[in-house]
Image (cartoon, rainbow, N blue to C red):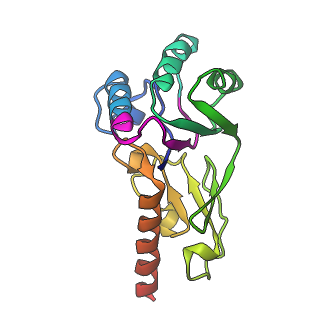
Amino acid sequence: MIYLTSDLHFFHDRGFIYEPRGFKSVREMNDAIIENYNRVVKPDDDVYILGDLLLGGPDSLDKGLKLIGELNGNLHLVRGNHDTDTRWFAYSTLQNVVEQQNAIYLKYEGYHFFMTHFPCFTANLEKETLKQCTINLYGHTHQMTNFYQDIPFMYHVGVDSHDCAPVSIDQAILDMKAKVRECINKI
């Protein structure tokens, strides 16, 4: 199974991150994300994490790496704006990290995905089917909805719009197909 997520923000001790997610503290958020994540993802699954795994000062790096090491699956990482050189190098030391890129291109079931941290216009919006375009999967925005400006070819995978858990690539495809139908019906 393939899962997608972003912006876990472990140890980001700021209310504007954990409070909108429904938590009273960063520790409560960290614990819930780990629990939700490992409830969904199995050890042999592939997980694409589109940036911003960890924040905080130097003292949080070792604790954060321990949390990331507890995540199930083979982790494919896309670099986010908070993934400093120090953090980026440290992620490479974890056994569950199998890939690190600035962006990742993935073909799956006839679909073409361009995975980035930042939203990125990649599709010809006049195309009628998802298989005729390159779909952008992204994070960064911390939005509570799944689509960038209601565009069916730009899908937000961040924990903020997925109940603090990864979303399967198959569910993302279903959501995008529904959005395409919704847009066609508006015409």
Q: Where is residue 14 in the image (x, y as percent from the top left)?
A: 42, 27
Q: Is residue 101 above or below residue 83?
A: below
Q: Residue at x 49, y 55 (%)?
A: 156
The reply to whether the magenta stretch includes residue 39 is yes
**Left or right, residue 90 beside residue 181:** right
Q: Which residue is drawn at 42% across and 50% down?
A: 167
Q: Position of residue 138 (x, y in %)?
A: 56, 52
Q: Find the residue positioned furthest to the front.
A: 44
Q: Can residue 82 be seen in this view?
A: no
Q: Find the residue positioned furthest to the bottom.
A: 187
Q: Is residue 67 visible?
A: yes
28 or 130, which is in the foreground?
130
**Left or right, residue 17 beside residue 79:** left
**Left or right, residue 1 beside residue 31:** right
The reply to whether the magenta stretch includes residue 26 is no
Q: Which residue is drawn at 32% across and 24% down?
A: 25
Q: Where is residue 59 in the image (x, y as percent from the top left)?
A: 53, 10
Q: In this view, does 16 lie above or below 106?
A: above
Q: Is residue 102 above or below residue 112?
A: above
Q: In which quarter of the image is residue 179?
A: bottom left
Q: Where is residue 170 in the image (x, y as percent from the top left)?
A: 45, 60
Q: Find the residue positioned furthest to the top.
A: 59
Say how many tags the image has. 0
Q: Quadrant of residue 77?
A: top right
Q: Which residue is drawn at 40% across and 73% down?
A: 178
168 or 127, which is in the foreground?
168
Residue range in magenta is: 36-53
